[in-house]
Structures are given as C-alpha cells and as structure tokens.
Amino acid sequence: MIVLNNNNHSAYSDLDDGALVAAAKGGDDAAFEELTSRYLRVIEWYAGRYSFCPHDKEDYLQEGLCGLLKAVRTYNGISSSFSTYASICIRTSIITAVRKDGRGKDRLVSYEETVSESDGSDSISPESIIIEKESTDFLYERIKSVLSKYEATVFDLYLLDLSYADIALCLETDSKSVENAVRRIRTKLKKLISP
C-alpha cells in the first residue's frame, strides 16, 4: 500500500508540477511526496482497471509509483504538460507489469467486454475460452517474432490506443519515428497473413 507522510506538504501544495518536478529531481523527497499525493488517484485508477484481485492491485500501485518516478526523472518540460507525460508513464508501467505477469493479454480486454461482444449467448464454455486464449497467445507471439524490439514496443503501445505523439513521449523519440515503425509493422503483418 502507498502511504504518504502528510507532514511538510503545506509548503509544497502551492507549487505547480514543474517546480515540484525540478525539486524532486534535485533530491527533495517532500516534493516527490507531494507529486505522489497529486497523482495517487491516477495511479489507483490504472491499477484498479487492470487488477482482478487485491494482491494484483497492490503490485500495480507500486508499478504505477515507479512510473511516476520515471516521469519525474525523464520529464523535459518541452513536448507536453507534466500531467500528460506522468499519466502515460504510469499507465505504461502498469501495463508492462500486467504483461510480464503472463496474464496480461487476457487483462487488457476484460472478461465482461468479451462476453458482451459475443454472439449474445450467455453459455460460454470454459473450453472455448481456453481455446480462444491459446489462439490469441499464439497469434500474438507469432506477430512479435517478426518485429524488431523497437517495433514490438511500439506495437504494444499502439494496441493500447495511444496516439503517435503519446507513444513518442513514452519512448523518448519523435512522432515521425513512431509513424515509420507503425508503417513497417503493417507491412510485416501483411506479409505474415498473406497466403
């Protein structure tokens, strides 16, 4: 569980995010605590969105906090507001953890969404769910096998419906590089599915 020390926050509560980021980069722990208190709801929202049990949520809260720390360390103040950048870093950190759990591909689309998009029948057998999961896992691994490491990362972020600009922020590159990677990915996918 994330526990904040509320002492000394009054001195920082009037500062904007940019000033707090600069102070936190300089080693000011209280400035980072203030940022954590400001972004705790964002971290909790993303952790809750991808969690299916309390143990997962605790893990993902910590991952979200690591994402916030990354945002503080890498924010350059040029391309976007800190709040946008921090939200992307938090979300990416949690989603990366979900995928590393080995259950990530299931969790990125919830079971309820899968059922609501089915043919309307309420009788989905456990066997059909397992077969569909194995097919999805196989296809995902096959796609990843033809992509470079950079392209695979772009592909994962693209599947999350992030814009080219947001993907570029996450990867600390420019939008044109992301656009070119997506073009290469599409070309490789066409070759992969061609008979």
Image (tube, rainbow, N blue to C red):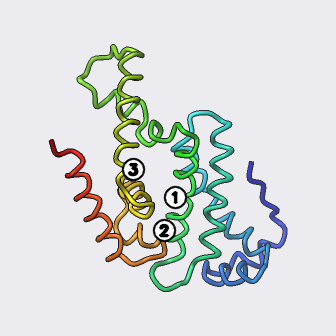
User: Of the numbered discs in the image, which one, if any, rests on residue 144?
Assistant: 3
**Numbered disc in front, either 3 or 2:** 3
Residue 115, picture quadrant: top left
**Which residue is under mark 1?**
92
Element type at marker 2? helix
Q: Residue at x 32, y 29 (%)?
A: 116
Residue 46 picture location, percent across and down: 54, 51
- Disc 1 secondary structure class: helix
User: Residue 129 has which mark?
Assistant: none
Tell me the residue at 67%/84% (across/down): 22
Query: Which quarter of the image is occupied by the C terminus?
Result: top left
Q: Mark 3, residues whose alpha carbon is within 10 Å: few (<14), some, or many (≥20)?
A: some
| Residue type pointed to by label 1 | Thr
Distance of mark 2 from mark 1, alpha carbons?
Answer: 8 Å
Q: Residue furthest right?
A: 7
Residue most extreme to the left: 195
Q: Amino acid at mark 3?
A: Lys
Determine whether label 2 and label 1 are within 8 Å by CB.
yes
Q: Nearer the viewer, residue 8 or 161?
A: 161
x and y, in percent, of residue 27 in the image: 78, 79
The tally of labels here is 3
For marks 2 and 1, the one nearer the N-term is: 1
In the picture shown, does residue 30 fall above or below 77? Answer: above
